[in-house]
Image (cartoon, helix red, strand yellow):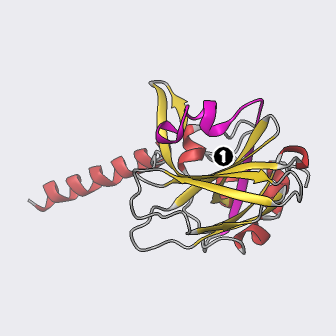
Amino acid sequence: MKYKSLVALALSAVAWTGMSNVTAATVTLNKQFLDENDCVGYFGKNLSSCAIYSTDETGAVQISPVIAKYDIEYESVTGEAVTIGEVNAGFNTVTGNEFEFSTSSSGSWLYKRGENDPGVRYWAVKSGNGFNLFWTVESALLSNNAVCDSDNYFTLECLGAAQVVTMGEYDTIDGKELSHITFYDSVDPYVVPVPGAAWLMLSGLVGLVGFARRNKR
């Protein structure tokens, strides 16, 4: 599967919506990282320290820690895929059996989320010398001047707008053999800031309320 541009992703929003539990019109974004490994370098050196992050003027901001990582190994004789899972010790309600996914170079995944289980907001697939990161946002956020309206949409604001989903799709870089798939949590998600214009509007409303109260007195 070739990688989709933001425009193509927007056009396919209806199809992607059918693959998630999000009711609003949504689109799944994909960021490619070449010569990187998500939980063995880029987002952390091991499972306990692995977390999605971005940066702002203060430096690195952690957004979501990892829930579970599944390594895919292949039998040397039969070529059959064998899945080896590891769960972050911080999530004691997750056994690892909640996730179902295909092990091909492109496919889908399903998360049978329990009542006290964390929610998935990001998923990454490693293959060859790189990985793809995916997250789902409202399609309106790709409009002009919205938080994901840029060729550089790997930003704190756009990542912070990621929705909680229980299913999704993926493809590996250049269709290479899947090495592992990782799911990231929604604990204390970064909240997208209210745009400046909205803050001005809110301030104006507060001012009007105060003015009305003074006149009433």
Q: Position of residue 130 (x, y in %)?
A: 77, 36
x, y percentage for residue 141? 64, 53
Nearest the viewer among 2 and 80 is 80
Residue visible at 82% across and 64% down? Answer: 12
Q: Is residue 115 left or right of residue 105?
A: left
- Residue 116 screen position, x and y as percent: 39, 69
Judged from this view, the residue extending furthest toward the left is 217
Q: How many marks?
A: 1
Name which residue lies at 48% across and 46% down.
65
| Residue range corresponding to the magenta coloring | 25-50
Residue 51 visible in the shown view? no
Amino acid type indicated by mark 1: Cys
What residue is shown with label 1? Answer: 148
Residue 39 falls inside the magenta stretch: yes
**Which of the image's four quarters has the N terminus?**
bottom right
- For this rendering, which residue is in front, 28 or 36? 36
Q: Residue at x 76, y 71 (%)?
A: 14
Q: Is residue 68 left or right of residue 168?
A: left
Residue at 72% across, 75% down = 18
Q: Quadrant of the C terminus?
A: bottom left
